[in-house]
């Protein structure tokens, strides 16, 4: 028989192994604990949505919708898409579940994988993970500020190093159209210095000029008119309130007048978390206010504000403490006869809250102890023929390699066993 070829993961997809996911768990646990303290509840969303949801929420002409979505026709002819982000799903669920009527001021958080078919490059994957939170039904500046305070606290908790908060206001329907025209006029006056993409942006959505990475375009835009100078009074007041509330809580941030969002439903508050030392892809997360989105998805005129964090990037700047300790004990049955007593012993210790590994029998004690070292266990509990005859297992201190012969009564009740093992652990170096 020929050997079957191994199957590899799809290009741009990868596995997250325990050493890495331990760090992710620490971050996710910190996020969940923080969000719950601020009154948020978790929403678990489907990964698959109707394509239309993203076409409407992200805009037909955005890069994500045009080039990066995993879209396919399901067997019933429905066009479906692997979600490229979660805000649209949160809003859809908010409307579909009736929360919009029963609890219009919902505070929801989510976590999970998102999918974008971006060009593969180092450190970027087509399945990536986000943690995010959304506040629906709140127009007041307090909602924006509280969300940002929560975000700042989370970053402190996970010890995210070198991450700064950048803030801006992108105006609203009252003041942005006039600003957009001013920006368009500015762009037209500098047409010769702008790249082809910017020529298109200029006609379709001049705010996107600020997204251009071309050096010459950036130089031109350094002198462009800024939206902060064009805000109407209500937008100006909203921003001033957000800033005052952030100051009250000692949240530090910088204003970035070039921070814009291209879609019409984004209003007022926009923010980004930028990490030093991550290169061009330096945004750890971002968010803002999207008062028009709920209506755009067929709901009532309900305001919203939220953020999303990239878990991979957050993990790369986080110095959160991760428990790297091995199991408290590893149970080693030497022969087939020791298997059942070993399982019973390990189970009772686990029932008492101890982390215990169990190895199969059939290897020499020497080989089993090598395994115990590799697993970084602190104690080995040896169940050999001699031990079975005595009804007492031998406990080996793996930090000093000292045996205590027949130290653990195999038939003792679970709590007593656990007490003995914990007493041994306390004597370790
Ligand atoms: Zn350009
Ligand atoms: Zn305005």
Image: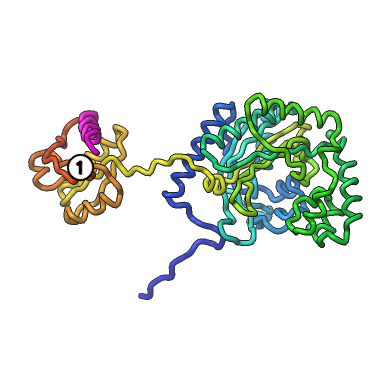
Horizontal and vertical percent position of residue 285: 63, 43
Horizontal and vertical percent position of residue 22: 44, 44
Of the pair 165 and 303, the residue shown nearer to us: 165
Q: Is residue 47 left or right of residue 425?
A: right
- Residue at the image position 61 percent from the left and 46 percent from the top: 275
Of the pair 408 and 180, the residue shown nearer to us: 180
Q: Is residue 195 left or right of residue 336?
A: right
Mark 1: which secondary structure?
strand
Horizontal and vertical percent position of residue 213: 73, 56
Furthest-top residue in this view: 248
For the N terminus, give its image quadrant.
bottom left
Quadrant housing residue 387? top left
Q: In this figure, which colouring scheme has been used for the structure?
A: rainbow
Quadrant housing residue 269? top right
Q: Which residue is mark 1?
A: 397
Within 8 Å of ligand 1, the CB of disc 1? Answer: no
User: Does residue 416 show up magenta in the picture?
Assistant: yes
> Does residue 46 appear in the picture of this structure?
no
Quadrant housing residue 419? top left
> Does residue 91 appear in the picture of this structure?
yes
- Residue at the image position 69 percent from the left and 40 percent from the top: 166
- Magenta-highlighted stretch: main secondary structure? helix
- Residue at the image position 89 percent from the left and 50 percent from the top: 186
For the C terminus, give its image quadrant.
top left
Image quadrant, ligand 2: top right
- Residue at the image position 46 percent from the left and 47 percent from the top: 21
User: Does residue 421 show up magenta in the picture?
Assistant: yes
Of the pair 404 and 32, the residue shown nearer to us: 404
Q: Range of the magenta residues? A: 415-429
- Residue 219 to residue 41: above or below: below
Q: Residues within 10 Å of mark 1 (few under 14, many from 20)?
A: many
- Residue 171 to residue 415: above or below: below
């Amino acid at each position: 028989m020929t050997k079957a070829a191994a199957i590899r993961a799809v290009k741009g997809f990868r596995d997250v192994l325990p050493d890495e996911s331990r760090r992710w768990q620490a971050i996710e646990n910190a996020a969940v604990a923080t969000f719950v303290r601020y009154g948020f509840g978790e929403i678990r969303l489907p990964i698959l949505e109707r394509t239309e949801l993203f076409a409407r929420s992200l805009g037909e002409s955005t890069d994500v919708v045009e080039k990066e979505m995993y879209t396919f026709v399901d067997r019933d002819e429905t066009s479906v898409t692997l979600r490229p982000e979660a805000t649209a799903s949160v809003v859809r669920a908010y409307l579909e579940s009736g929360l919009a009527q029963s609890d219009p001021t919902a505070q929801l958080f989510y976590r999970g994988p998102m999918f974008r078919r971006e060009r593969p490059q180092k450190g970027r994957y087509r399945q990536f993970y986000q943690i995010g939170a959304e506040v629906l039904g709140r127009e007041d500046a307090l909602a924006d500020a509280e969300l940002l305070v929560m975000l700042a606290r989370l970053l402190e908790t996970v010890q995210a190093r070198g991450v700064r908060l950048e803030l801006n206001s992108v105006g609203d329907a009252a003041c942005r159209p006039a600003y957009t025209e001013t920006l368009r006029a500015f762009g037209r006056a500098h047409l010769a210095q702008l790249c082809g993409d910017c020529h298109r942006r200029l006609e379709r959505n001049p705010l996107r000029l600020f997204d251009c990475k071309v050096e010459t375009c950036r130089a031109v835009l350094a002198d462009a008119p800024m939206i902060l100078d064009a805000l109407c009074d209500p937008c100006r007041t909203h921003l001033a309130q957000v800033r005052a509330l952030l100051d009250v809580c000692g949240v530090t941030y910088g204003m970035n007048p070039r921070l814009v969002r291209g879609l019409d439903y984004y209003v007022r508050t926009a923010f980004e978390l930028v990490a030093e030392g991550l290169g061009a892809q330096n945004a750890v997360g971002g968010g803002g206010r999207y008062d028009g989105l709920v209506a755009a998805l067929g709901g009532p005129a309900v305001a919203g504000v939220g953020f999303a964090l990239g878990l991979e990037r957050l993990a790369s700047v986080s110095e959160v403490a991760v428990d790297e300790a091995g199991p408290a004990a590893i149970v080693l049955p030497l022969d087939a006869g020791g298997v059942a007593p070993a399982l019973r012993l390990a189970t009772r210790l686990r029932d008492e809250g101890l982390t215990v590994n169990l190895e199969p029998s059939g290897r020499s004690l020497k080989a089993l102890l090598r395994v115990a070292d590799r697993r970084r266990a602190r104690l080995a509990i040896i169940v050999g023929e001699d031990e079975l005859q005595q009804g007492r297992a031998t406990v080996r201190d793996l930090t000093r390699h000292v045996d205590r012969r027949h130290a653990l009564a195999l038939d003792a009740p679970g709590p007593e066993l656990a007490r003995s093992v914990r007493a041994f652990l306390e004597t370790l170096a």
